[in-house]
Image: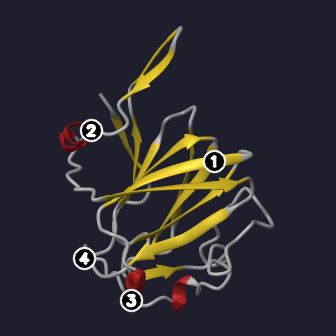
Amino acid sequence: MIQVRTTPLAGVLVIEPQVHRDERGFFVESYSARELAAHGITTAFVQDNHSRSVRGTVRGLHYQVGVGQVKLVRVLSGAIFDVAVDIRWGSPTFGQWFGQELSADNFLQLYIPVGFAHGFCVLSDTADVSYKCSSYYAPQDERGMAWNDPTVGIDWPVRDPILSSRDQHHPALMELGRDFIWGG
């Protein structure tokens, strides 16, 4: 049985699976399409990604245009500060962000729908992050947004992050294409 919590950003959800602990350790059902469907989440996932990053790394903010890409993010080891930013032009929460600590200890997952940029900052020495995607990676559809855009004002837990060269040069929110228009 899972618990699903809403966030201030409509569609972005925090998912808490049931964890069974005993003297041997723990058991958790990390993904169940049936459990998610019972909460109205019927996304079909087609690809799993896994990254390992060191403390202070910021990956993102990324998104994919075209059909878009829903993500279901969890941490296998370590801890991250996971962030979603509403990039749906016309949305009542356009440009707002939500952040949640995800860790191997708290088992929380973040569900990020199409129309949101996603990124995370590593809080532990290293972190292994796994995320399910609703569409296949398409390099021609890959986009990014500046991780430190002052108009968005994400309160990252790092001042001088480790960034890829690509993530150092993404445009600000107001410079993004109108790839996602809010439909009400």
Pointer 3 or 1: first along the chain: 1
Q: Nearer the viewer, mark 3 or mark 1?
A: 1
Residue contact at pointers 1 and 2, CB within 8 angstroms: no
Q: Position of residue 178 (x, y in %)?
A: 38, 89
Residue contact at pointers 2 and 3, CB within 8 angstroms: no
Callout 4: SS: loop
Q: Is residue 7 above or below residue 182?
A: above
Pointer 3 or 4: first along the chain: 3
Q: Position of residue 34 (x, y in %)?
A: 19, 38
Q: Tell me how far mark 2 sits from mark 4, CA to CA.
A: 29 Å
Q: Tell me how far mark 4 sits from mark 1, CA to CA.
A: 36 Å
Q: Nearer the viewer, mark 2 or mark 3?
A: 2
Callout 3: SS: loop
Q: Tell me how far mark 2 sits from mark 3, CA to CA.
A: 34 Å
Q: Which residue is mark 1?
A: 127
Instruction: Look at 47% across and 81% down and name the residue there.
Output: 143
Q: Which residue is mark 4?
A: 183
Callout 2: SS: loop
Pointer 2 or 3: first along the chain: 2
Pointer 1 or 2: first along the chain: 2
Residue type at mark 2 is Ser
Instruction: Look at 53% across and 91% down and name the residue there.
Output: 175
Pointer 4 or 1: first along the chain: 1
Q: Which residue is mark 3?
A: 178
Q: Which residue is mark 2?
A: 32
Instruction: Look at 22% across and 56% down and name the residue there.
Output: 44
